[in-house]
Image: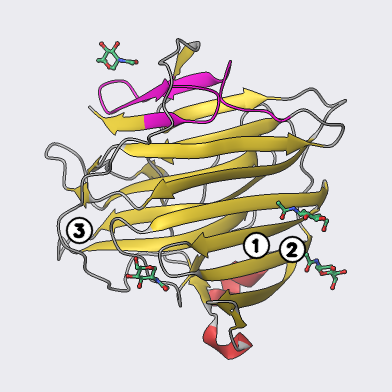
Amino acid sequence: MRWFQLLLLGSALLLENATALKYEVTGTRKGVPIPKEQIKFAPYQFGRSKNNGPGAVQPAPTKIKKKRANPISSSANWCGAVNHSPTTNKIKSIHSFWQVPGCTKRTGQTYPQAAAVWIGIDGNTWPSALLQSGTVCKIDTSTSATRHEAWWQWVPDTAFTISTMPLAVGDWIEVTINTTSDTAATIKFDNVSQDEQVIVNVTSGPTLARKDADWVVERPYYGSSLAGFPRFDTTWFEDSYATRTTGGNLGILGATQYQIPSLCNSTEYDNANSVSFSL
Ligand SMILES: *[C@@H]1O[C@H](CO)[C@@H](O)[C@H](O)[C@H]1NC(C)=O
Ligand SMILES: *[C@@H]1O[C@H](CO)[C@@H](O)[C@H](O)[C@H]1NC(C)=O
Ligand SMILES: *[C@@H]1O[C@H](CO)[C@@H](O)[C@H](O)[C@H]1NC(C)=O
Ligand SMILES: *[C@@H]1O[C@H](CO)[C@@H](O)[C@H](O)[C@H]1NC(C)=O
């Protein structure tokens, strides 16, 4: 799977990689527009600090009806649900809610350690592009400090951290990615707990097929090797759905449930809720 580069990127490399990407950013806080200078992106990297305490235990959603048995597949770094739509009915938008999970170091894993929770379009059966946004916890090698960040990426372009939107364990996050074509989309990242949202309007990005809908907890790459995978609080993806261009929402029913053997399991509950948990 292609995923964002946890590289210590310099801005030169960032610009070089950002070939087709054109975007503008807006935001609101409690319904009031946030001045542009108060919304900042940074290259996605380790290094900034926002220390959070031990993770809060996430309550299971109340909407659970029934555990189902979707097909299971293994991955080296993806854990979660991936569903598909035919190219005759392209995915238009994808949506989910979750709470920022607490993370703790996992012994026997390399450092730094990181676990990213995200939703996205493509990257599975369409590996040349992936539009994704979510949260990530990162445990620093030398200090063991844990940071939680909001981020977005249009692979193969580089990832951005929304550096003016620090997150805390337990925050409710709502992400909506809304495409208007194969190369344009808005990403709405909403801190529901705080009623603060940032909208990235990408008017030119790498071409999507819009056929994979992804709700994922990922063990990301750090440079060219996988980061260590920490333990994380059970993560519920709630109200998970993808809308489609000619109608009929796609849910989690029938999605492939990816597992990272011995590290992470994923289970479907009903057509809108799935769960990923550390092994
Ligand atoms: C998000 O909401 C939580 C409250 O639950 C708050 O602690 C955190 O600072 C908020 N983040 C931003 C950027 O508003
Ligand atoms: C997606 O974008 C379309 C066109 O701009 C808009 O009408 C619609 O409300 C948006 N949907 C969401 C969920 O943001
Ligand atoms: C995104 O930007 C384009 C170009 O400025 C504009 O036409 C479009 O309405 C914007 N979309 C949203 C959802 O703001
Ligand atoms: C979770 O992982 C364990 C150990 O790999 C496996 O035995 C079990 O069947 C998995 N559960 C689910 C729901 O996939």
Percent position (x, y) of residue 180?
83, 52
Percent position (x, y) of residue 84?
68, 24
Q: Is residue 12 above or below residue 274?
A: below
Q: Quadrant of the C terminus?
A: top left
In terms of secondary structure, where does tag 3 sit?
Answer: loop
On the picture, is 193 further left or further right than 176? left
Given the image, on which type of amino acid does mark 3 rest? Thr
Given the image, on which type of amino acid does mark 2 rest? Val
Q: Is residue 1 magenta?
A: no
Pick whichever of labels 2 and 1 is earlier in the sequence.
Answer: 1
* Crowd band around label 3 with a 10 angstrom C-alpha radius: few (<14), some (14–19), many (20+): few
Q: Which residues are magenta?
A: 249-275
Q: Residue at x 81, y 33 (%)?
A: 90
Residue highlighted by disc 3: 141
Q: Residue at x 58, y 89 (%)?
A: 37
On the picture, is 120 further left or further right than 22? left
Ligand 2, image quadrant it occupies = bottom right
Percent position (x, y) of residue 166?
38, 71
Report the Cα–Cα distance between label 2 and label 1.
16 Å
Which-is-in-front pick, marks 3 and 2? 2
The answer to whether residue 5 is seen in the rendering is no
Q: Is residue 227 above or below residue 257?
A: below
